[in-house]
Amino acid sequence: MVLGRTHIKDVAAKRKVELNSYLQSLLSSSPEVAECDLVYTFFHPLPRDERMDGSDVTVRDIGHPPLSPTSGKIEGEVKLSISYRNGTLFIMVMHIKDLVIEDSTDPNPYVKTYLLPDPHKTSKRKTKIARKTCNPTFNEMVSFSGDFQRTWL
C-alpha cells in the first residue's frame, strides 16, 4: 500500500504554469495594480532569502556636515529601494541588519526620513516600530511628491 500522492511532479508542473500565467497577468495589468504597495512589498525578499554578492553601495562624503542627529559611530546596514516616477519619489524601506545594542536590551527600531532642507520637518515620514529586534524587516513604502531640485534625503 502506498500512501500520499503519486503524481507530485505532474501536479507541481501544472501549478507552476498556472502561477506563471497569473503573475504575468498581474504584473502586466494597469499601474494601479502592478505597481501598488501590496504587490511591491510581496515580491521583495526577506534578508534570509538573499545572498550577498559583494556589490555594496557606498555613500560618499560630498563636503557637507553630517545630517544625522546622532553622534559617534553608527553601525548596522539599511536596505532601501529608491525610485522616482511621475513626479513622486518612492522609498521602499526593506530591512535593517546588525543594529547596535546600547543598554543590553533589544531596541524598538523604526526608520525616519526627511527631505532636506526642511526646518519645520514637514516632509518627515516614519515607518512602524519593529519591537525588540536588531534585525527588523519593515517592507514599507514612503513617498514624497513635489519639486526635488534643492532637496536631500
Image: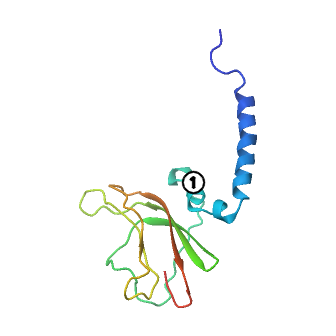
Determine whether, in the image, residue 102 is placed left or right of residue 110: left
Q: Quadrant of residue 145?
A: bottom right
Q: In this picture, is 147 found above or below 3?
A: below
Residue labelled with disc 1: 42
Number of numbered labels in the structure image: 1
Q: In this picture, is 25 found above or below 150?
A: above
Residues 77 and 54: in front is 77
Determine whether, in the image, residue 18 is placed left or right of residue 118: right
Residues 151 and 70: in front is 151
Query: Under tag 1, what secondary structure?
Result: helix
Residue drawn at (37%, 62%) of the image: 99
Residue drawn at (63%, 19%) of the image: 4
> Residue most toward the left?
103
* Image location (x, y in percent) of residue 14: 75, 35
Residues 31 and 43: in front is 31
Residue drawn at (65%, 60%) of the image: 33
* Image location (x, y in percent) of residue 141: 51, 66
Determine whether, in the image, residue 128 is placed left or right of residue 25: left
| Amino acid at dot 1 | Phe
